[in-house]
Image (spheres, helix red, strand yellow):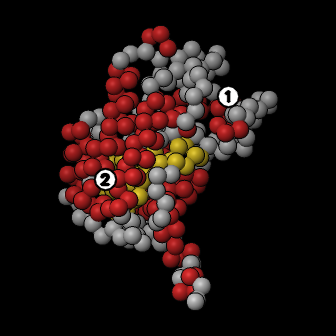
Amino acid sequence: MAHASSAADLSVPRLFDFKNHVAVVTGGASGLGEMAAQSFVQNGAKVIIASRKEAELKKTADRLNKLGPGSCDYVVADLKDKAGCDSLCKQVKGKVDRVTVLLNNSGATWGAPYDDFPEAGWDKIMALNVKSMYYTTVGLDAELKKGATPDNPSRVINIASMAGISTVDVTSGPEGGLSAPGSGVFSYGPSKAACIHLSKIQASKLMSEHITVNCICPGVFPSKMTAFGMREAMDTLVSGQPSGRVGKPEDFAGLVLFISSMGAAHMTGNVFEIDGGSTRSGFRSKKKNEARL
């Protein structure tokens, strides 16, 4: 009997070909979403980015279209509630008849003191970081199923966070962090833990429909969400990085492309940690003023 690989084409161009992908990226005008969108466009895919602010969407789409060889379109959508998710899905359906990758990336955070944390800081964060992923995925179900096969499934990639795994106190010390000194992002971690759990439930449900669902948990990457911490407390953030740096676009984009590739067609329900080993190692540097991107 011939070896199984004797008739297989295991070349990089075949395993990592993205030219036939149609990707929808929420929160795609900036930060992690923009990194993902660029990785698809630069590898020949058709991309639709979504966000609340049209000016930012247009600026990003124009930049990515100049890069090519793929293309980038956009839709304006606010995913704060089901109506916003339904609007996004309707607009996407008006532009394409199938979606091969849905990257649920829209998210927000909220910092406040532990004993004075507003209810709105829970409601907004849970709605955008968890509920929107559910309703957007459900709303594009038919488009994800169209053309999906066992060998070439569609992909749902939910962006969670290492905050959904870590259980340390999130109160920022006097030196600051991702929120102002003395405050914490108390609703953010629980929302991302819910995202991880939702992803596993979706993976269990959708694999028989030839849709994989995987979850990415980034650590600190340049984005609007981390802008305060990177501006005010970069040394503190980097002190917890064994590599001595925070994440780069190449780190995130490479993982997104892998999950979207033929090489990951048989993988679902995974939670990918991408924080340079910070959380697992508990690393804390004794050196100061050596922060670098």
Residue 209 horizontal/vertical position (percent): 32, 62
Q: Residue furthest top?
A: 115
Q: Quadrant of residue 76?
A: top left
Q: Which mark is residue 270?
A: none
Q: Nearer the viewer, mark 2 or mark 1?
A: 1
Say if 234 sits above or below 144 in the image: above
Position of 11 with respect to 281 (left or right) is: left
What residue is rendered at 35% in x and 53% in y? 205
Residue 66 place in picture, x, y as percent? 42, 62
Residues packed near mark 1 inside 10 Å, few (<14), some (14 to 19) or many (20 plus): many
Image quarter hosting the C terminus: top right
Disc 1 marks a residue whose amino acid type is Thr
Q: Position of residue 280 (x, y in %)?
A: 67, 39
Element marked by disc 2: strand
Q: Foreground residue, 225 or 216?
A: 216
Q: Is residue 58 visible?
A: no
Check disc 1 and report the residue beneath it.
236
- Write the residue at 59% across / 46% down: 274
User: Cβ–Cβ below 8 Å for labels 2 and 1?
Assistant: no
Identify the residue at horizontal 58%, vertical 46% (top origin): 273
Residue that badge 2 annotates: 74
Total marks drawn? 2
- Residue furthest to the right: 286
Q: Is residue 103 above or below residue 165?
A: below
In the image, 235 versus 240, the foreground residue is: 240
Q: Say which amino acid is labelled 2.
A: Tyr
